[in-house]
Image (cartoon, grey):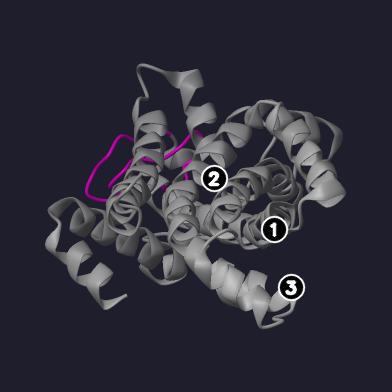
Amino acid sequence: MRRTFVILVRNPLSVIGLLLIGFVLFVALFADFISPYPEHAGAVVDFLNANRPPSAEYLLGTDGVGRDQLSRIFHAYRIAIVLGVVVLGISVPIGVLIGLLAGYLEGWVEYILMRIVEVFLSIPPLVLALAIMGVLEPTLVNGMIAVTAMWWPWYARLVYNIVRGEKVEGYVLAAEVIGASVPHILFREILPNCLPAIITKMTLDFGFVILIASSLSFLGLGVQAPTPDLGSMVADGTKYLPDIWWLTVFPGLAILIAVFAFNLVGDVLREVLNPDQ
């Protein structure tokens, strides 16, 4: 961990990524305190200041009902971070457990589990999420369910491929010879050797989760008004292009910053933790 940290802070790209991630996390956690107009994250109407361009009073302009864009973007980051944490917090353990069991036990367990994984992988992720959200009510919780349903199979496939190679290594065979239990072999012997790849994928996926969630909101299937969401803000702004450009450009840049930051750090982690890939 110390070596990885030193490499990260010495790499200019990862430093930029870490600074951007820190900025996103900071504004998400303290949006209520640093937003110029925190009340504009809710159902506030101020038609006298509607569609104002960026100025000293409203740095990123206002929307069609007079709400401050900067304040809403800060609060939208909070929704995006919560969504990413919850989705990965649920999908990673599920996918890792299934991958460990399928890769090590083989036989009918491997066959059943991996056929289920392949069924999910055969459906384009966004199409699967759209299908789920088309059935469920478009809320934040249901959005998390939709994105989680499309994300866990990728971790199952990743861990499965790693376990297939690790289980023939000497340390696993030695553990089997001395009578170690299957849970011990899976979680104390094999899993630690899967962590570098898992951590790298989680870092890269965090940005993609935000992007997919924003795509659902852009299509009207994510977080609903008046709750601020980056995807829905972009969708609302497209109605007024090109004249009122700030309604689309600034939320779009907010999505770009978040995805770009996690990709920068993820790429460096991949080179550090998985040098052979």
Residue 2 image point, x, y percent = 26, 77
- Considering the numbered disc 2 on the image, is that residue within a helix, a strand or a loop? helix
Residue 215 image point, x, y percent = 56, 32
> Pointer 1 and pointer 3: residues touching (CB < 8 Å)?
yes
Q: Residues within 10 Å of mark 1 (few under 14, many from 20)?
A: many
Q: Is residue 146 above or below residue 168?
A: above
Magenta segment, which residues? 51-68
* Mark 1 to mark 3 CA distance (whole Å): 9 Å
- Does 63 lie within the magenta span? yes
> Pointer 2 and pointer 1: residues touching (CB < 8 Å)?
no
The tag earlier along the polypeptide, 1 or 3, is: 1
Q: Which residue is mark 3?
A: 182
> Looking at this rendering, what residue extends furthest in the top direction?
242
Q: Say the numbered circle drawn on residue 85.
A: none
- Considering the numbered disc 1 on the image, is that residue within a helix, a strand or a loop? helix
- Does 161 lie within the magenta span? no
The tag earlier along the polypeptide, 2 or 1, is: 1
Q: Which residue is mark 1?
A: 104
* Mark 2 to mark 1 CA distance (whole Å): 29 Å
Res. 44 visible in picture: no
Residue 166 image point, x, y percent = 54, 58
Q: Which residue is mark 2?
A: 209
Side of 12 relative to 94 (left or right)? left
What residue sits 51% from the left and 45% below the top? 210
Q: Residues within 10 Å of mark 2 (few under 14, many from 20)?
A: many
Q: Is residue 255 above or below residue 2?
A: above
Residue 104 image point, x, y percent = 69, 58
The amino acid type, in three-letter code, at marker 1 is: Tyr
What residue sits 36% from the left and 16% below the top? 242
The amino acid type, in three-letter code, at marker 2 is: Val
- Considering the numbered disc 3 on the image, is that residue within a helix, a strand or a loop? helix
